Protein backbone atom coordinates (compact mmCIF):
# COMPACT_ATOMS: atom_id res chain seq x y z
CA UNK A 1 0.00 0.00 0.00
CA UNK A 2 2.72 2.49 0.93
CA UNK A 3 4.40 2.01 -2.48
CA UNK A 4 1.26 2.54 -4.57
CA UNK A 5 -0.17 5.47 -2.61
CA UNK A 6 2.48 7.99 -3.77
CA UNK A 7 1.58 7.16 -7.39
CA UNK A 8 -2.12 7.84 -6.74
CA UNK A 9 -1.89 10.63 -4.15
CA UNK A 10 -1.99 13.62 -6.51
CA UNK A 11 -4.85 12.29 -8.65
CA UNK A 12 -8.51 13.13 -8.23
CA UNK A 13 -11.08 10.36 -7.95
CA UNK A 14 -11.62 10.19 -11.74
CA UNK A 15 -7.88 9.83 -12.26
CA UNK A 16 -7.80 6.95 -9.76
CA UNK A 17 -10.68 5.25 -11.58
CA UNK A 18 -8.88 5.59 -14.90
CA UNK A 19 -5.70 4.11 -13.43
CA UNK A 20 -7.73 1.25 -11.96
CA UNK A 21 -9.47 0.56 -15.27
CA UNK A 22 -6.15 0.50 -17.14
CA UNK A 23 -4.66 -1.87 -14.57
CA UNK A 24 -7.75 -4.11 -14.66
CA UNK A 25 -7.58 -4.28 -18.45
CA UNK A 26 -3.96 -5.46 -18.30
CA UNK A 27 -4.76 -8.08 -15.64
CA UNK A 28 -7.79 -9.27 -17.62
CA UNK A 29 -5.82 -9.52 -20.86
CA UNK A 30 -3.10 -11.61 -19.26
CA UNK A 31 -5.57 -13.94 -17.54
CA UNK A 32 -7.70 -14.22 -20.66
CA UNK A 33 -4.75 -15.28 -22.80
CA UNK A 34 -3.68 -17.87 -20.23
CA UNK A 35 -7.19 -19.32 -19.87
CA UNK A 36 -7.94 -19.40 -23.61
CA UNK A 37 -4.70 -21.21 -24.30
CA UNK A 38 -5.83 -23.99 -21.98
CA UNK A 39 -9.48 -24.16 -23.04
CA UNK A 40 -10.95 -26.29 -25.79
CA UNK A 41 -13.27 -24.07 -27.88
CA UNK A 42 -14.38 -26.49 -30.55
CA UNK A 43 -18.18 -26.16 -30.19
CA UNK A 44 -20.49 -23.13 -30.20
CA UNK A 45 -21.75 -23.68 -26.65
CA UNK A 46 -18.23 -23.62 -25.22
CA UNK A 47 -17.38 -20.48 -27.18
CA UNK A 48 -20.52 -18.70 -25.96
CA UNK A 49 -19.75 -19.70 -22.37
CA UNK A 50 -16.18 -18.44 -22.74
CA UNK A 51 -17.39 -15.06 -24.02
CA UNK A 52 -19.88 -14.71 -21.14
CA UNK A 53 -17.34 -15.68 -18.52
CA UNK A 54 -14.81 -13.28 -20.01
CA UNK A 55 -17.27 -10.37 -19.86
CA UNK A 56 -18.23 -11.13 -16.26
CA UNK A 57 -14.58 -11.55 -15.30
CA UNK A 58 -13.67 -8.15 -16.73
CA UNK A 59 -16.47 -6.45 -14.78
CA UNK A 60 -15.44 -8.23 -11.56
CA UNK A 61 -11.74 -7.50 -11.97
CA UNK A 62 -12.45 -3.83 -12.75
CA UNK A 63 -14.68 -3.47 -9.66
CA UNK A 64 -12.16 -5.13 -7.35
CA UNK A 65 -9.16 -3.18 -8.69
CA UNK A 66 -11.08 0.12 -8.47
CA UNK A 67 -12.05 -0.58 -4.86
CA UNK A 68 -8.46 -1.42 -3.93
CA UNK A 69 -7.07 1.65 -5.70
CA UNK A 70 -9.60 3.97 -4.05
CA UNK A 71 -8.83 2.54 -0.61
CA UNK A 72 -5.09 3.01 -1.15
CA UNK A 73 -5.58 6.51 -2.57
CA UNK A 74 -7.77 7.80 0.26
CA UNK A 75 -6.50 5.75 3.20
CA UNK A 76 -4.79 8.71 4.99
CA UNK A 77 -8.19 10.36 5.57
CA UNK A 78 -10.58 7.41 5.69
CA UNK A 79 -12.13 6.26 8.93
CA UNK A 80 -13.24 7.80 12.18
CA UNK A 81 -12.16 11.18 13.56
CA UNK A 82 -13.02 13.28 16.60
CA UNK A 83 -12.84 17.02 16.26
CA UNK A 84 -13.15 20.17 18.33
CA UNK A 85 -14.62 23.14 16.49
CA UNK A 86 -13.73 26.74 17.20
CA UNK A 87 -17.50 27.19 17.67
CA UNK A 88 -17.24 25.09 20.83
CA UNK A 89 -18.89 21.90 19.51
CA UNK A 90 -17.39 18.43 19.24
CA UNK A 91 -17.93 16.04 16.39
CA UNK A 92 -17.55 12.34 15.70
CA UNK A 93 -16.74 12.41 11.99
CA UNK A 94 -16.36 9.63 9.45
CA UNK A 95 -14.91 9.63 5.95
CA UNK A 96 -15.96 6.59 3.92
CA UNK A 97 -16.06 5.18 0.41
CA UNK A 98 -19.63 4.35 -0.56
CA UNK A 99 -20.62 3.36 -4.07
CA UNK A 100 -17.20 4.42 -5.32
CA UNK A 101 -17.57 7.95 -3.90
CA UNK A 102 -16.12 9.68 -0.85
CA UNK A 103 -18.64 10.61 1.82
CA UNK A 104 -18.38 12.65 5.02
CA UNK A 105 -20.74 12.40 8.00
CA UNK A 106 -20.69 13.77 11.54
CA UNK A 107 -22.59 13.43 14.80
CA UNK A 108 -22.33 16.65 16.81
CA UNK A 109 -21.91 16.65 20.61
CA UNK A 110 -21.49 19.28 23.31
CA UNK A 111 -18.37 17.81 24.94
CA UNK A 112 -15.36 15.69 24.13
CA UNK A 113 -16.54 13.15 26.71
CA UNK A 114 -19.81 12.66 24.79
CA UNK A 115 -17.94 12.22 21.51
CA UNK A 116 -15.61 9.65 23.10
CA UNK A 117 -18.62 7.86 24.60
CA UNK A 118 -20.07 7.64 21.08
CA UNK A 119 -16.83 6.03 19.87
CA UNK A 120 -17.07 3.44 22.63
CA UNK A 121 -20.77 2.85 21.96
CA UNK A 122 -21.79 3.54 25.52
CA UNK A 123 -25.52 3.34 26.39
CA UNK A 124 -27.63 6.42 25.66
CA UNK A 125 -24.86 8.15 23.69
CA UNK A 126 -27.19 8.56 20.70
CA UNK A 127 -29.46 10.88 22.70
CA UNK A 128 -26.51 13.20 23.33
CA UNK A 129 -26.10 13.92 19.61
CA UNK A 130 -27.79 17.27 18.93
CA UNK A 131 -27.29 17.47 15.14
CA UNK A 132 -25.98 15.46 12.20
CA UNK A 133 -23.81 16.54 9.28
CA UNK A 134 -23.75 14.95 5.83
CA UNK A 135 -21.75 15.76 2.73
CA UNK A 136 -23.28 16.92 -0.53
CA UNK A 137 -20.05 16.53 -2.49
CA UNK A 138 -16.49 15.57 -1.53
CA UNK A 139 -13.22 15.94 -3.45
CA UNK A 140 -9.81 14.65 -2.40
CA UNK A 141 -6.71 15.61 -4.33
CA UNK A 142 -3.08 16.30 -3.50
CA UNK A 143 -3.66 15.34 0.12
CA UNK A 144 -6.50 17.77 0.77
CA UNK A 145 -10.22 17.15 1.28
CA UNK A 146 -12.74 19.75 0.17
CA UNK A 147 -16.46 19.28 0.67
CA UNK A 148 -19.87 20.88 0.83
CA UNK A 149 -21.97 19.86 3.81
CA UNK A 150 -25.41 20.33 5.28
CA UNK A 151 -26.50 20.07 8.89
CA UNK A 152 -29.90 18.59 9.63
CA UNK A 153 -31.81 16.66 12.30
CA UNK A 154 -30.83 19.37 14.75
CA UNK A 155 -32.31 20.21 18.14
CA UNK A 156 -34.47 23.31 18.30
CA UNK A 157 -31.65 25.39 19.78
CA UNK A 158 -29.33 24.67 16.84
CA UNK A 159 -30.33 26.03 13.44
CA UNK A 160 -29.97 23.87 10.34
CA UNK A 161 -27.27 25.17 7.99
CA UNK A 162 -24.95 24.36 5.11
CA UNK A 163 -21.35 25.19 4.42
CA UNK A 164 -17.95 24.36 3.01
CA UNK A 165 -15.08 22.55 4.71
CA UNK A 166 -11.42 22.04 3.79
CA UNK A 167 -9.41 19.37 5.63
CA UNK A 168 -5.62 19.18 5.52
CA UNK A 169 -3.81 16.17 7.07
CA UNK A 170 -1.05 17.16 9.48
CA UNK A 171 0.04 13.62 10.26
CA UNK A 172 -1.30 10.08 10.24
CA UNK A 173 -3.36 10.95 13.32
CA UNK A 174 -4.38 14.58 12.89
CA UNK A 175 -6.02 16.99 10.43
CA UNK A 176 -6.78 20.70 10.42
CA UNK A 177 -10.10 21.91 9.12
CA UNK A 178 -11.34 25.29 7.91
CA UNK A 179 -15.09 25.81 7.57
CA UNK A 180 -17.55 28.40 6.40
CA UNK A 181 -21.17 27.99 7.49
CA UNK A 182 -24.29 29.70 6.14
CA UNK A 183 -27.52 30.04 8.13
CA UNK A 184 -30.56 31.40 6.34
CA UNK A 185 -30.97 35.08 7.16
CA UNK A 186 -27.64 35.44 8.99
CA UNK A 187 -24.11 36.43 8.12
CA UNK A 188 -21.82 33.49 7.18
CA UNK A 189 -19.63 32.32 10.03
CA UNK A 190 -16.12 30.88 9.77
CA UNK A 191 -13.98 28.74 11.99
CA UNK A 192 -11.52 25.88 12.35
CA UNK A 193 -11.55 22.23 13.35
CA UNK A 194 -8.81 20.33 15.19
CA UNK A 195 -9.30 16.68 14.22
CA UNK A 196 -7.62 13.60 15.62
CA UNK A 197 -8.06 9.87 15.59
CA UNK A 198 -9.99 8.55 18.63
CA UNK A 199 -7.65 8.05 21.60
CA UNK A 200 -4.77 9.69 19.75
CA UNK A 201 -5.18 13.32 20.74
CA UNK A 202 -1.87 15.10 20.71
CA UNK A 203 -0.14 12.27 18.82
Image (cartoon, rainbow, N blue to C red):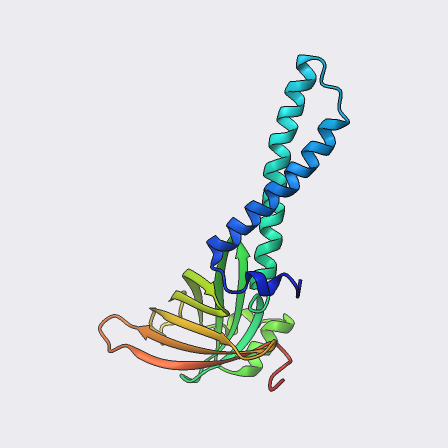
Examine the image and state in which quarter residue 8 appears: bottom right
Along the line of sight, the residue nearer the viewer: 111 or 179: 179
Q: Residue 155 lies in what quarter of the image?
A: bottom left
Decide if residue 64 is on the left or right side of residue 151.
right
Q: Is residue 82 above or below residue 60?
A: below
Q: Please state if 19 lies on the left or on the right of 40 as rendered.
A: left
Up the image or down, 46 lies above or below 80; here it is above
Percent from the top left, x then y, of residue 174?
Answer: 56, 79
54 sits to left or right of 21 = right
Residue at 42% x, 85% y is: 86
Identity of the residue furthest to the left in this view = 185
Report the quarter where the N terminus lies: bottom right
Q: Which residue is situated farthest in the right direction here? A: 38
Q: Quadrant of the C terminus?
A: bottom right
Residue at (59, 41) in percent of width and height: 25
Position of 26 relative to 92 (above/below): above
Is residue 141 at all visible to an observer of this figure? yes
Q: Residue furthest bottom?
A: 202
Visible residue check, residue 99 = no
Q: Is residue 50 above or below residue 119?
A: above
Counting labels gives 0
Tell me the residue at 58%/62% (across/down): 7
Residue 95: where, in percent of width, then height? 53, 65
Amino acid sequence: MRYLHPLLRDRNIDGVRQAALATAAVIFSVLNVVVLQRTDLEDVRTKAAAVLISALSLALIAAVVQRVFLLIWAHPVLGQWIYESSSGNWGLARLDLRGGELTYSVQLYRTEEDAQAAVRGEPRFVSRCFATVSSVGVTYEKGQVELIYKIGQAHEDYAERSGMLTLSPLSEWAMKGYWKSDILGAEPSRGTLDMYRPNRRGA
